[in-house]
Image (cartoon, rainbow, N blue to C red):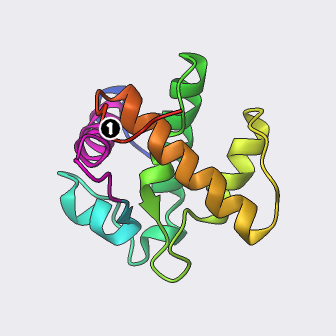
Amino acid sequence: MKHDMTEQEWTAKKDDIIRILSVQARMAEPTPITYKELCRQMQLPPAFESPQASFELRDLLDEIDRDEAALGRGMLTSLIHNEELNQPGNGFFLLAKKLGFEFDRTEEGRLKFAIEQIQRVSFEQGNNQSGGS
């Protein structure tokens, strides 16, 4: 059990997040959403006041990116941004390094990497208008 959920409940939450992010990726102009907006759109959001501080949400997003990486795809969670930073949170970049992605650790390098990942997942999701890599 993960976070007091059955495997079926966990998988349903992951599938829900993947569905939401896939819609964002296929938009004519792929648009990131905030962690709060992701939770608002989820059928069963984590029961936590601040989505960025939710261990459940963090673990769901990490598992999604690990699964995508195992399939040779980009980081789908690049489409979720921290409201204040206007880019993915630090956990996204830490996991990217663990998964073997290379990028400059400066703010500019992190932003460039996030944009490249958005373009890549948009293309992988079937949006050929996004100019994927």
Callout 1 crowding tier (Cα within 10 Å): few <14, some 14–19, many ≥20? some
Q: Residue furthest top?
A: 71
Q: Residue at x 73, y 70 (%)?
A: 107
Q: Main secondary structure of the magenta part?
A: helix
Which contiguous range is marked in magenta? Answer: 11-31
Asked whether, in this view, residue 40 is left or right of residue 50, the answer is left
Location of residue 75 in the rendering, given as x and y in whole percent from the top left corner = 53, 39
Mark 1 is on which residue type?
Ile
Asked whether, in this view, residue 62 is left or right of residue 33, the answer is right
Q: Residue at x 56, y 78 (%)?
A: 85
Instruction: Determine which residue is flagged by label 1.
Output: 18
103 inside magenta stretch: no
Pick whichever, 84 or 40, lies toward us: 84
Q: Residue at x 49, y 36 (%)?
A: 120
Pick whichever, 55 or 94, lies toward us: 94
Pick whichever, 127 or 10, lies toward us: 127
Quadrant of the image containing the C terminus: top right
Q: Does the image show residue 18?
A: yes
24 inside magenta stretch: yes
Location of residue 42 in the rendering, given as x and y in whole percent from the top left corner = 22, 54
Q: Residue at x 40, y 66 (%)?
A: 35
Asked whether, in this view, residue 102 is left or right of residue 1, the answer is right
Instruction: Count every numbered label the image shows and give the total.
Output: 1
Location of residue 84 in the rendering, given as x and y in whole percent from the top left corner = 51, 83
